[in-house]
Image (tube, rainbow, N blue to C red):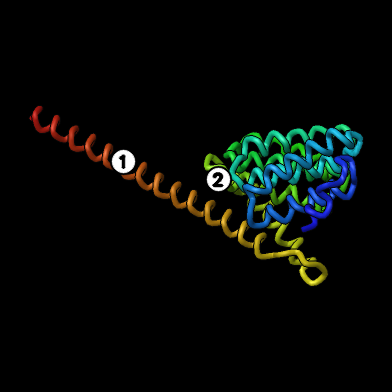
Amino acid sequence: ACWKTYLGRPERDGSRCLALRVLGDALCVSRTEEALPVFEAYLELRRRCWPGTTEEIRKAKANLACCLTLLDRHDEALELRHEIFAVCKASDAHQTIPSGVAVTDALLQLNRYAEAKTILRELLAQSRQVYGEHDRCTLTVIKSLAQAICLDGSSSYEDLGEAETLALKCLNFARLLRDKSSIDTFTDRSLFDTIRHKKGALEQEAREQEALRAAAEAAISECASISKGARCYVCL
């Protein structure tokens, strides 16, 4: 109804443009495929009629990227996330880290763990320098890095130990602020438990491999002893 009210207005009418964005937001909730062309049209309209509104164009790209992600079109979403990240690094320091984390989220959807971890480590160093260790922005990066390590099937026992330390830091911070904000400790606890479970599984696997190695060595030693005894008997 909102869109139909302003549909007949000129293309450069601000209310018409806003109505188009609201239509996309509403459709994306339950009719994502229908929302996609609306978000694309809104972004194109912004670029064509208001090229100087960089912040609104950034938001339009972010909305389009979210819609593409919901439709499992992760490569296209990643391309947009990279565009946003590049613009933020050049002109918007406050959005650089959030936009960088969004890039790594898209990379994780594509199982590109090494790239995601590299970017997150760079973001973590930057966030610690700019905001400090216990800022929420820094802790968001810490949590994302812990998740990336946990999801990477090639992570070693030492890697998971690092992830466990990072996740514990997030969990302790969430507990500290639990009564002062709406921070959800459940997801932090779930991540921590998942990492510990994977770490425990690697420990168990290492113990089993060590037991097999020891058994194999014992069997070889026993065979060598038997063989030596047999040779001595022949000599007699």
Question: Is 60 positioned to the left or the right of 55 in the image?
Answer: left
Q: State which tag comes first along the sequence, 2 or 1.
A: 2
Q: Disc number at residue 216?
A: 1
Secondary structure beneath dot 1 equals helix
Question: Is 21 positioned to the left or the right of 49 in the image?
Answer: left
Q: Position of residue 75 (x, y in %)?
A: 62, 35
* Residue shown at the point (67%, 44%) measured from the top left: 36
* Residue shown at the point (37%, 47%) measured from the top left: 211
Evaluate whether residue 64 shows in this view.
Answer: yes
Amino acid type at circle 1 is: Ala
* Residue shown at the point (10%, 27%) measured from the top left: 235
Closer to us: 173 or 119: 119
Amino acid type at circle 2 is: Tyr
Q: Position of residue 35 (x, y in %)?
A: 68, 48
* Residue shown at the point (69%, 42%) measured from the top left: 37
Binning the other alpha carbons within 10 Å of mark 1 as few (below 14), some (14 to 19) or many (20 upward) gives: few
Residue placed under numbered mark 2 in the picture: 157
**Residues under labels 2 and 1: Cα distance?**
24 Å
Q: Disc number at residue 101?
A: none
Question: Is 30 positioned to the left or the right of 215 in the image?
Answer: right
Closer to us: 231 or 5: 5
Closer to us: 185 or 104: 104
Q: Position of residue 115 (x, y in %)?
A: 65, 34
Question: Is 77 positioned to the left or the right of 228 in the image?
Answer: right
Secondary structure beneath dot 2 equals helix
CB-based contact (under 8 Å), mark 2 and mark 1: no
Mark 2 vs mark 1: give the one in front: 2
Image quadrant holding the C terminus, namely top left
Evaluate whether residue 105 shows in this view.
Answer: no
Q: Position of residue 10 (x, y in %)?
A: 88, 42
Image quadrant holding the N terminus, namely bottom right
